Image (tube, rainbow, N blue to C red):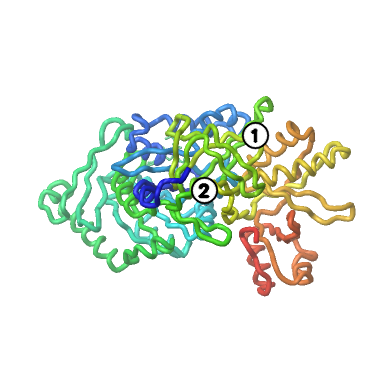
C-alpha cells in the first residue's frame, strides 16, 4: 500500500516537536516536565510526576524501580498538545537510573532543552549530556530555573555557559527581580514585561500573566521607577553582551536561546514554551547508509533507540522504543528489519500519553512507538517497509564506570561469555577485555550503577551465571587510535589501562579527567575519541 504523499506528511509534521531535557539532578527536570504536561493539558494538577520521583528517590534498588515499571515505561515518552503544537517529550533517565539509555534518548530527539539551576549553572551531568548533543550538532534551548530564589547574576551565568561549554547564548526573556521579589520576565523582542500572578496553590495550576509594555506608565506603578529603569538598563546591556539572534546558528547548535523562569511557581514557563516550540526544529532528516532519509519520504522508516527489558523472568517480553523517521506508521504494518532481512509485523504498537499507555493506530515522523518484542530487536536496529534503510548506528559513548567480572563457578565461563555478548548487543552494558596471561578477562563498562545491577540480575536469571563485580578505579575513558607501540608506551607503568572492545578497538582508561588530559598532552599524535569509532 503506497504511503501518503510528501505534502501530506509535511503538513502533518510541520507542528511536531520532539525533544529531551538535559540537566543535572535537582535542577528541576521533574518539576518542569510536570509543568509542561500541566500546560499541555495532559495532567490537571501538578504533583503526580513528583510522587513518582519521590518513590524513585527513596531507593536506588532497581527491583523497586521495576515494580513501578508500568509507570517508568509509560513516562519514557510523553505526548501532549499545546497551542496547535504536537509535542513529544522524551524522558531522559536520570538520578539512580542514569544509564546509556539517557544518551541514546538524545539521539532520538531533534532538539534539547538544557535546564540550569540559577545558582549552580552548568554542572557535571549537564556537561556530559551537552557533549552528546554537540556531537550531533543538535539545537539547544536553555531554561534557567529557580529564579524565585536568589541565584547568581544572570549576566555572569551567560559568560559561564559560554566559557564552560563554548556555546553562545541569546537571552530571549530576562528575569525581573530575582529571589522573593521575582515578579516576571521581560520579553526582549517585544520590549514588554510579563507579570505573573502568584496564585494560592504553589504552582499546582496554570498562572495568569499580564503583558505590559516596558514604556507603559502603569509598569512603574507596579514595579517602581528604579526597577523599571534597571530592567531597561539590563536589556540595553544585553544588546551588547549577548550573541545576536541567528536561526542558522541555533539550527547548528552553536547558539542557544535562553529563557528565565521558575518551574515551581510556573513563572516564565508559558513564554518559554511559546518561543521554544516556535523555533525548535520539526522532525529532521536522518542520515542512513549511503543516503539521507527525509521525514517526508513516503515509506515508513524508524530506528530502535532503547530497549526496556522486563525483569520479571516469567515475562521475557521487552519493549523496543522506535523513533519514526519517515512515512506513515499504521498498526499491524509489516516492516523489514535491515540487520537480518527478516520481516516483522508491528502488531501492538504503544503510544505514551502522559501517564497512560495506549495502543495506537498510527504515528508520524518525530513520534515514538513502543513495540512489544520477544528478543528480535537491538538498540540501533533500522526498520522500514522495504528493508533498504540502515540508519547510521547510535554511537557507543565512553563509559564512566568499569568493573571486572568475577565468575563464581568457573565451569560457567561459556555461559558468561554468551550472556555478556548478548547483553552487550542489546545495549544493556558495554563489554571489554583486558589481556592477561590466563587469557582475556572481561571488564564491563557503564555510565550508571543501575546498568551493573541489572547486568548481574539478568546474567543469573537468563544465563544461570552467578558473578560478582570488582569495581576498577578508573572514571574516564576514550577510544584510542594510532601507533600500537605508542599506545603501549602510554599505558606502561602508569595508572592507565588499555582494554579491547569486541571489534578489537582499543580503549584507554584513566583515573580522572586530569590523568586523561595528561595522556593527551603526552601523546598528541594519538586520536582520543569519546564515542566508539
Ligand atoms: P530533578 O528532577 O531535576 O532532579 O529536580 P526536581 O524537579 O525534583 O527538583 C529538585 C528540587 O528543586 C525540588 O525540591 C523542587 O521542588 C525544587 N525546584 C524545582 N524547580 C524549582 C523552582 O523553580 N524554584 C524553586 N525554588 N525550587 C524548585 P526538593 O526540596 O528536593 O523536593 P520537594 O520537597 O519540593 O519535592
Q: Nearer the viewer, residue 57 or 12?
A: 12
Precedes in sequence: disc 1 or disc 2: 2
- Is residue 121 something one can see in this rendering? no
Picture disc at residue 301: 2
- Is residue 316 something one can see in this rendering? yes
Q: Within the image, what quadrant is residue 355 found in?
A: top left
Are the residues tagged 1 and 2 within 8 Å (C-beta)?
no
| Real-space Cα separation, disc 1 to disc 2, in angstroms | 20 Å
Mark 2 CB near ligand 1 (8 Å cut): no
Q: Nearer the viewer, residue 334 or 430?
A: 334
Task: Name the residue: 66% across, 73% down.
Answer: 524
Image quarter (top left, top right, bottom left or bottom right) of the C terminus: bottom right
Residue 485, percent across and down?
79, 71
In this rendering, would 80 be left or right of 341? left
In this rendering, would 98 be left or right of 212? right
Residue 2, percent across and down?
46, 46
In the displayed structure, 191 sits above or below 518; it is above
Mark 1 CB near ligand 1 (8 Å cut): no
Residue 155, percent across and down?
35, 60
In this rendering, would 373 be left or right of 72? right
In this rendering, would 207 be left or right of 302? left
Nearest to viewer (mark 1 / mark 2): 2
Determine the quadrant in which ligand 1 lies.
Answer: top left
Picture disc at residue 374: 1
Residue 520, percent across and down?
65, 69
Q: Within the image, what quadrant is residue 526 found in?
A: bottom right
Q: Nearer the viewer, residue 80 or 475?
A: 80
Amino acid at each position: 500500500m503506497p504511503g501518503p504523499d510528501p505534502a501530506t506528511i509535511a503538513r502533518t509534521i510541520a507542528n511536531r516537536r520532539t525533544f529531551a531535557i538535559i540537566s543535572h539532578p535537582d535542577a528541576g527536570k521533574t518539576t518542569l516536565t510536570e509543568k509542561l504536561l500541566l500546560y499541555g493539558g495532559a495532567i490537571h494538577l501538578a504533583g503526580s510526576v513528583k510522587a513518582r520521583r519521590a518513590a524513585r528517590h527513596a531507593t536506588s534498588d532497581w527491583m523497586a524501580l521495576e515494580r513501578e515499571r508500568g509507570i517508568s515505561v509509560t513516562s519514557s515518552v510523553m505526548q501532549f498538545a499545546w497551542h496547535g503544537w504536537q509535542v513529544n517529550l522524551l524522558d531522559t533517565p536520570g538520578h539512580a537510573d542514569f544509564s546509556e539509555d539517557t544518551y541514546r534518548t538524545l539521539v532520538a530527539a531533534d532538539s534539547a532543552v538544557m535546564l540550569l539551576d540559577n545558582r549552580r549553572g552548568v554542572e557535571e551531568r549537564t556537561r556530559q549530556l551537552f557533549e552528546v548533543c554537540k556531537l550531533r550538532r543538535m539545537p539547544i534551548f536553555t531554561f534557567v530555573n529557580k529564579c524565585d530564589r536568589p541565584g547568581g547574576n544572570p549576566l555572569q551565568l551567560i559568560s559561564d555557559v559560554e566559557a564552560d561549554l563554548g556555546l553562545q547564548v541569546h537571552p530571549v526573556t530576562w528575569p525581573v527581580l530575582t529571589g522573593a521579589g521575582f515578579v516576571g520576565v521581560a520579553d526582549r523582542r517585544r520590549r514588554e514585561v510579563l507579570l505573573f500572578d502568584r496564585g494560592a496553590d504553589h504552582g499546582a495550576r496554570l498562572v495568569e500573566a499580564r503583558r505590559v509594555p516596558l514604556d507603559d506608565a502603569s509598569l512603574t506603578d507596579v514595579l517602581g521607577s528604579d526597577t523599571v529603569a534597571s530592567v531597561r538598563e539590563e536589556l540595553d546591556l544585553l544588546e551588547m553582551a549577548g550573541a545576536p539572534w541567528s536561526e542558522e546558528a541555533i539550527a547548528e547548535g552553536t547558539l542557544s536561546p535562553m529563557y528565565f523562569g521558575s518551574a515551581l511557581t510556573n513563572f516564565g514557563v508559558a513564554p518559554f514554551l511559546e518561543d521554544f516550540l516556535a523555533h525548535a526544529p520539526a522532525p529532521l532528516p536522518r542520515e542512513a547508509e549511503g543516503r539521507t532519509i527525509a521525514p517526508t519520504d513516503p515509506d515508513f522508516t524508524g530506528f530502535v533507540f532503547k530497549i526496556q527489558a522486563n525483569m520479571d523472568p516469567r515475562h521475557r517480553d521487552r519493549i523496543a522504543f522506535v523513533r519514526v523517521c519517515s512515512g506513515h506508521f499504521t498498526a499491524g504494518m509489516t516492516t523489514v528489519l535491515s540487520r537480518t532481512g527478516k520481516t516483522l509485523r508491528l502488531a501492538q504498537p504503544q503510544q505514551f500519553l502522559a501517564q497512560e499507555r495506549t495502543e495506537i493506530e498510527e504515528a508520524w515522523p518525530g513520534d515514538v512507538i513502543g513495540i512489544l518484542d520477544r528478543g528480535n530487536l537491538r538498540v540501533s536496529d533500522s526498520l522500514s517497509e522495504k528493508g533498504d534503510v540502515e540508519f547510521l548506528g547510535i554511537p557507543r559513548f565512553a563509559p564512566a564506570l568499569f568493573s571486572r567480572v568475577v565468575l563464581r563457578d568457573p565451569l560457567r565461563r561459556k555461559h558468561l561469555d554468551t550472556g555478556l555478548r548478548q547483553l552487550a548487543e542489546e545495549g544493556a552494558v558495554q563489554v571489554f577485555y583486558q589481556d592477561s596471561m590466563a587469557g582475556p578477562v572481561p571488564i564491563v563498562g557503564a555510565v550508571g550503577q543501575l546498568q551493573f545491577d541489572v547486568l548481574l540480575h539478568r546474567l543469573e536469571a537468563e544465563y544461570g551465571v552467578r558473578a560478582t563485580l570488582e569495581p576498577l578505579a578508573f572514571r574516564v575513558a576514550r577510544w584510542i587510535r594510532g601507533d600500537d607501540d605508542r599506545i603501549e608506551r602510554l599505558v606502561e607503568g602508569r595508572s592507565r589501562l588499555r582494554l579491547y572492545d569486541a571489534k578489537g578497538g582499543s580503549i584507554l582508561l584513566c583515573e580522572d579527567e586530569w590523568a586523561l588530559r595528561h595522556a593527551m598532552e603526552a601523546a598528541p599524535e594519538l586520536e582520543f575519541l569519546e564515542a566508539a569509532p
